[in-house]
Image (tube, rainbow, N blue to C red):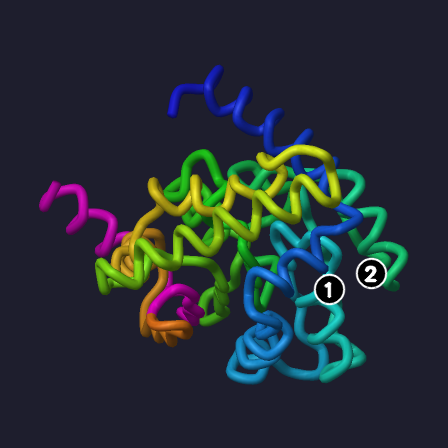
Amino acid sequence: MNPPAEKQNAQLMRRMFGVIAPRYDFVTRVLSYGMDPRWKRNAVRQAALCDDCAVLDLACGTGDFSALVQQKFPRATCIGVDLTEPMLRLARDRGLANVACGDATRLPFRDGSFDCVFIGYGLRNFPDLHAAIREVARVTREGGEIVTLDFFLPRNPFFRRLYLAYLFAQGAFWGVLLHGTPRAYTYIPDSLRNFVSADELSRVLERGGYERVRARSFILGGIGIHWARRCQALQCEAASLASAVSS
């Protein structure tokens, strides 16, 4: 995506999430059949965390991942970054003291700043997925981890159509009821049509500087969690060269 289009997309995302911020958590629970909290606990439980770890909660929304990490590891340092200030205000209200408004492709942190980076439902909305993963790898220490949770298109064609129809119908219903417009939440099925598959995301992570990718899917592949470890510098360089040669 070229810079003007990327900037325009970021502005649209900022406005949209600013509008839906107060009801975002509620609608996420509805669209996930009430399973969203369980998936996030699973993602945190299987992450390589410790008592004094430094965690980046990217596209943090209202700070769910940060809250779960701090419940389990009270001494952990959690920093939330989101594109939308209303989301960050809600995160602050929950007790997430360290928050910043920022872009996933231009993070204001030094190399290797974090032991773990969580991204919940944010990957689909990044204008340049590959650039965002490379930037996340930059701020993750060698041996650190990335953990992502997101919607995906199920493999089964019949269930894929059913799943998209469900997301669209529920999103339109709650959008009209809560915000007066059906488009408030139909961005989710729209974004899925252009998003990578769960298997493709594993390859994107490997090309972007990660290894030992683990993935787990739910709802017949409609939801996926990925865990991956940051490569050592020489391994990342070799992987990048191999990717460049193959392409």
Left or right for 104, reference 66: left
Q: Position of residue 108 (x, y in %)?
A: 65, 41
Magenta stretch holds residue 194: no
Q: Earlier in the sequence, mark 2 or mark 1?
A: 1
Identity, as a three-letter code, of the amino acid under mark 1: Cys
Q: Are marks 2 and 1 in contact (CB under 8 Å)?
A: yes
Q: Residue at x 22, y 55 (%)?
A: 238
Q: Pick whichever, 24 or 168, lies toward us.
A: 168
Q: Can you name the residue that lies furthest to the left here?
A: 246
- Residue at coordinates 34% horizontally, 68% vertically from top-left? 221
- The dot on residue 78 is 1
- Report the residue at 75% width, 70% height from top: 67
Residue type marked 2: Leu
Assess whether residue 241 is covered by the magenta stretch.
yes
| 153 relative to 181 in the view: left or right | left
Residue 226 lies, in percent from the top left, at 41, 68
Query: Looking at the image, which residue is at 63% across and 38% down?
Result: 184
Segment tinted magenta in the rendering:
221-247
Disc 1 element: strand
| Residue under pointer 2 | 96
Q: CA distance from mark 2 to mark 1?
A: 8 Å
